Image (spheres, rainbow, N blue to C red):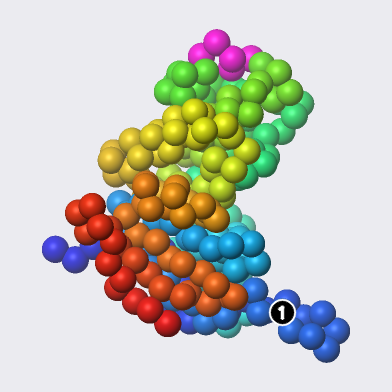
């Protein structure tokens, strides 16, 4: 049975114009994210992976090419409509956590639900349930500056799950964490994947990508250098530039 693509980028480029110079952040990339996959977008600094993440997550529009989110071409959607669909389909975990500092952990997790029209009672009940899921029941009334880096990351994960999205997109999810917390976070993302969530991580660390992902897109100089898929305990190249 053929799997369905939840996200697809077709010949996508993102250019930035600086005077007479053109910076080709990504240049004609093809990415297909199948429902239920665990995908890593991998590359060194300057490879275009952050721009690739923004395009894959429908946070940015392409200069050239087409981006489809669950079969819809996002280029033809109004920003308000795109934000609504993106809010339901994709949960984001940012490298710097991006928690709002004057809101408690619980209030941070509740916030995305507000834009989906949920009642306060529903938002509170779901936020408490999600914070319990990430083992932060005793920290839900704490503010971000009262939490460790690992705890803030777990709040960010709980927030990403607030609207029960199909896709979790994580930018360097372990970049600011110690090795013990790194394993906890990645094991939790693996658990979500086993429960049917599509996971996309952006990372510069091959050991993270190869340990946890099932598909890896290797970026270099704004282009996809190769695509590899896990086959048993080994990796096979399915596409090479």
Quadrant (top left, top right, bottom left, bottom right) of the N terminus: bottom left
**Eyeballing the image, is 70 above or below 224?**
above
Between 153 and 75, the one lying in front of the other is 153
Give yes or no for residue 36 being in the magenta stretch. Answer: no
Q: Which residues are magenta?
A: 137-141
Furthest-right residue in view? 19
Question: Which residue has dot 1 on it?
Answer: 23
User: Can residue 126 be seen in the rendering of this structure?
Assistant: no
Image x and y of residue 224, in percent: 48, 74
User: Can residue 112 be seen in the rendering of this structure?
Assistant: yes
Q: In this image, 197 relative to 91: left or right? A: left
Give SS at disc 1. strand
Image x and y of residue 27, in percent: 57, 80
Residue under the image location 64 percent in, 62 percent down? 45
Between 223 and 58, the one lying in front of the other is 223
Q: In this image, 111 relative to 154: left or right? A: right
Q: In this image, 194 relative to 183: left or right? A: left
**Eyeballing the image, is 121 above or below 211?**
above
Between 241 and 157, the one lying in front of the other is 241
Quadrant of the rendered structure where residue 35 is? Answer: bottom left
Q: Main secondary structure of the magenta part?
A: helix
Furthest-left residue in view? 1
Furthest-top residue in view? 138
Quadrant (top left, top right, bottom left, bottom right) of the C terminus: bottom left
């Amino acid at each position: 049975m053929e799997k369905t693509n939840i996200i697809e980028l077709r010949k996508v480029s993102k250019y930035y114009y600086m005077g007479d110079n053109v910076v080709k952040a990504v240049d004609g990339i093809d990415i297909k994210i199948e429902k239920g996959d665990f995908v890593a977008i991998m590359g060194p600094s300057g490879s275009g992976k952050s721009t690739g993440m923004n395009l894959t997550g429908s946070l940015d529009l392409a200069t050239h090419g087409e981006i489809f989110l669950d079969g819809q071409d996002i280029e033809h959607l109004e920003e308000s409509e795109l934000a609504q669909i993106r809010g339901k389909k994709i949960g984001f975990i940012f490298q710097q956590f991006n928690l709002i500092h004057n809101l408690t952990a619980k209030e941070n997790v509740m916030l995305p639900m507000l834009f989906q029209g949920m009642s306060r009672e529903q938002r509170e009940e779901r936020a408490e349930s999600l914070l319990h899921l990430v083992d932060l029941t005793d920290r839900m009334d704490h503010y971000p500056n009262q939490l460790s880096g690992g705890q803030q990351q777990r709040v960010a994960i709980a927030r990403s799950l607030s609207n029960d999205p199909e896709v979790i997109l994580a930018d360097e999810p372990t970049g600011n964490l110690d090795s013990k917390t790194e394993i906890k976070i990645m094991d939790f993302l693996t658990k979500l994947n086993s429960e049917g969530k599509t996971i996309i991580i952006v990372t510069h660390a091959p050991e993270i990508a190869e340990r946890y992902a099932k598909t890896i897109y290797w970026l270099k100089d704004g282009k996809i250098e190769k695509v590899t898929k896990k086959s048993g305990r080994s990796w096979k190249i399915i596409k090479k530039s």
